[in-house]
Each structure stands twice: as structure tokens, then as C-alpha cells.
Image (tube, rainbow, N blue to C red):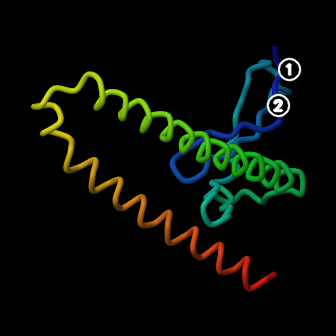
Amino acid sequence: MAGDLPDYYFRVRENGAVAFRVDTENRQRRIEMDQIAVINIRNGEVKPHGDHQLSEEDVAAITAWMTERTALLARRDIDDIHRAVDYLNITTQWVQSKAEDDQLEEVTDALLLAMHDLRSVLVRKKADRLMRAKGEG
């Protein structure tokens, strides 16, 4: 198993990760993970752990992980939005065909406000894009 392990492991946390160097080359042939850094994906900050000095290899691995993680999070964001569109359609169908009056009373105001807010932001953003495109063309 040890031969299949990567050289680095990243324990994901809320705003980034804790980076570890994986070591299997020891006398006990145990897997050891030495913490080398804390990563903040939002601001790009990498803080070496304790007195650890990051090597070029460490920095390259961390940078590659940050690039991959940022891309993954961006894909998840857009996937979540596509799911939200599906869920809005499912909600519309529920309102149309299954919802009882007391259920509608419970959710109508919250849904109307959320949809109004979303619509306002979408219309404003679309107008901004159209104005920029008109200015460029």
C-alpha cells in the first residue's frame, strides 16, 4: 500500500486545508504524516507549520493543490446553481399540483421575497453585461 500513496496529503477545512508530507520511508514502515503548512484558499495564503521551511517541491505541490481545489469549488458552485434551477422547477410543480393551503401559507412569503431578490439581482447583472458588451462593440 505504501507505494501507492501520494507524497502529500491535504486535509480540507472550511477555508482551505492543512498540508502534510506523507512519509513511508522509516524503519517501522509506518505511514507518517508531517504537517508542513496551513493553506487559506480564499486569500491564497500559505503559512508554514511551526519552524518548517517549505521546499520548492512543497510549494509546487501546494500550488498545484490550490489550483485544482479552486477549480473543483468553481465546478461545485455552478453545479449547485443548476440544482437550484431544478429545485425551483420541482417547487413550482409541487405548488401547482400538491401543496395544501396551510403549506402554501407557510412558505409563500419567504419564496416570493427570495425570488424577488434573485430576480432583481439577475436583471441588474444582465443589464450590466449588456451595457459592457454594447460599450465594447
- Give coordinates of residue 82: x percent, y percent: 57, 40
Image quarter hosting the N terminus: top right
Residue found farthest to the top: 1
Between residues 15 and 35, which one lies in front from this camera angle? 15
Depicted 105 relative to depicted 103: above or below: below
Q: Is residue 137 left or right of residue 95?
A: right
Label 2 Cα crowd, 10 Å radius (few <14 / some 14-19 / many 20+): few
Q: Secondary structure at mark 1?
A: helix
The residue positioned 76% from the left and 40% from the top of the image is 21
Above or below 34: residue 137? below
Q: Amino acid at mark 2?
A: Pro
Q: Residue at x 62, y 66 (%)?
A: 43
Q: Nearer the viewer, residue 69 or 36?
A: 69
- Estimate the x, y position of residue 106 in percent, counting from the top left: 14, 39
Q: Which residue is mark 2?
A: 6
Q: Point out which mark residue 4 bears.
A: 1
Dot 2 falls on a residue whose secondary structure is: loop
Residue 14, how many percent across, how many down? 51, 48
Q: Amino acid at mark 1?
A: Asp
Residue at 67% over, 44% down: 75
Task: Give the distance between the C-alpha atoms of the residues marked 2 and 1, in whole angstroms.
Answer: 7 Å
